[in-house]
Image (tube, helix red, strand yellow):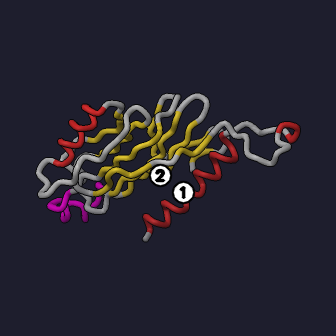
Amino acid sequence: MKQKFLRLFFGGILAFSLNTFAAPPVSAATDTDGLSHSPFHTLPYVTLGIGARSGCVRPAKMVITKDAEWRRVWHVHTQGMINPPALPVVDFSRQVVLVLLNGKSLSPDTSLEVAQVVTGPQETLVYYYLNGDDSTQRTRLKAARATQPFHFAAIDKPTTPIRFVNALSATCSNCGKF
């Protein structure tokens, strides 16, 4: 429940901050049509896979642009699974795959997911949530139930470089830490 609240709370702040502070103000003279002319736009994404168990035990954040690379990552991800899911189809002429892997986490409460993808004139930002705590006494007791949180998502190919940002530790030059 707490994680869901944090996700909603910080997601709202993230959206507010991006809309309010990230873009330079638009003058009334150029905003006569009543539409937003911000240089930042939210990109939709499609989840290809998300969960707590993966054959990928090393942390990674990557962008996959080729089918062969996608097949290799998916093969490693599904190693050891009984009845592994089929490889999701991706049209790499139009799309890229965002890969978030937390690696082995000692806390069964750890989760990882894309929060929002925002593209701007200089870069495309992939905001993600990493929730969980690996540092408590409780963790040692639950270590037998370690997880490997992951999220695979497809987006339309952006024209700017992609950067991954932890949404819970993101900063904005005009608004401080949020």
Residue 131 picture location, percent across and down: 38, 56
Residue 6 picture location, percent across and down: 49, 62
Task: Name the dominant secondary structure of the magenta segment.
Answer: helix
- Residue 57 in sight here: no
Q: Amino acid at mark 1?
A: Phe
Neighbourhood count class around disc 1 (C-alpha, 10 Å): few under 14, some 14–19, many 20 upward: some
Query: Mark 2 = which residue?
Result: 115
Disc 1 or disc 2, which is closer to the eye?
2
Query: Mark 1 = which residue?
Result: 10
Neighbourhood count class around disc 2 (C-alpha, 10 Å): few under 14, some 14–19, many 20 upward: some
**Quick check: 133 above or below 65?**
below
Instruction: Label 2, secondary structure: give it.
Output: strand
What residue sits 14% from the left and 47% below the top?
79
In the rendered structure, which segment of residues is drawn in magenta? 134-146
Residue 80 picture location, percent across and down: 11, 51
Is 65 on the left or on the right of 120, as rendered?
left
Mark sitting earlier along the chain (1/2) = 1
Residue closest to the eye, 58 or 175: 58
Q: Are marks 1 and 2 in contact (CB under 8 Å)?
A: yes
Which residue lies most toward the right here?
29
Q: Amino acid at mark 2?
A: Ala
Which residue lies most toward the bottom here?
1
**Quick check: 158 above or below 9?**
above
**Quick check: 48 above or below 123?**
below
Instruction: Label 1, secondary structure: give it.
Output: helix
Where, by quadrant of the figure, is residue 91 drawn? top left
